[in-house]
Image: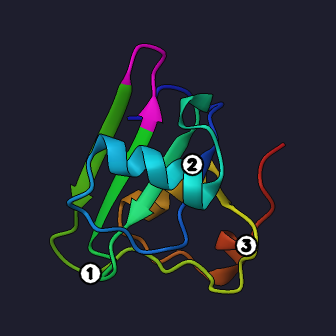
Amino acid sequence: MLPSRRIKIFACKIPTDMRSGFDALYKKTKDIIGLDPRSGHAFLFVNKNRTRVKILFYDGTGFVVIAKRLDKGVFSKFSPYYRKNIILTQAEFALFFEGAQINKRFIESPPPT
């Protein structure tokens, strides 16, 4: 789904209105996550109920938004104690995107180098 395994996936800690489009997600990436949306990395946004998710990334020619709504259950909740950006590994992202409940140890694993 994502263009490269080398990209980092940054998760926004603040719930996001899923009516947000390209421009609003671009602004949240800059203002909340504090990174350049054109960096080539992916940015993950989850709604308040944790039933919907959007991913924003730049593919070199333009922005791409991927959206998903779970039929049952909710996406994992990120630890409220995170002070820095949440960076998911490809394995963590794959589990998260499938709706699996990721345990605390997994979410708080160190970012890939």
Residue located beneath label 2 in the image? 30
> Secondary structure beneath disc 1?
loop
How far across and how far down the image is residue 85, in percent?
Answer: 69, 62
The relative height of residue 6 versus residue 77 in the rendered view (above or below) is above
Name the residue rendered at 71%, 86% in the picture: 81
Indicate which disc, 1 or 2, sits on the residue closer to the N terminus.
2
| Residue 58 is covered by the magenta coloring | yes
Check disc 1: other Cα within 10 Å, few if <14, some if 14-19, many if 20+: few
Residue 108: give its label.
Answer: 3
Q: Is residue 76 left or right of residue 78?
A: left
Residue 32 placement (x, y as % from top left): 57, 61
Q: Earlier in the sequence, mark 3 or mark 1?
A: 1
Q: Residue at x 33, y 61 (%)?
A: 53
* Percent position of residue 69, x then y: 20, 63
At label 3, which amino acid type do we have?
Glu
The residue segment tinted magenta is 57-62
Q: Residues within 10 Å of mark 3 (few under 14, many from 20)?
A: some
Q: Nearer the viewer, residue 105 or 77?
A: 77
Instruction: Measuring from the top left, give residue 64's x and y in whole percent.
Output: 34, 32
Residue underneath mark 1: 73
Three-letter amino acid code of the residue under disc 1: Gly
State the residue lying farthest toward the right.
Answer: 113
In this rendering, position of residue 12 left or right of residue 1:
right
Q: Residues within 10 Å of mark 2 (few under 14, many from 20)?
A: few
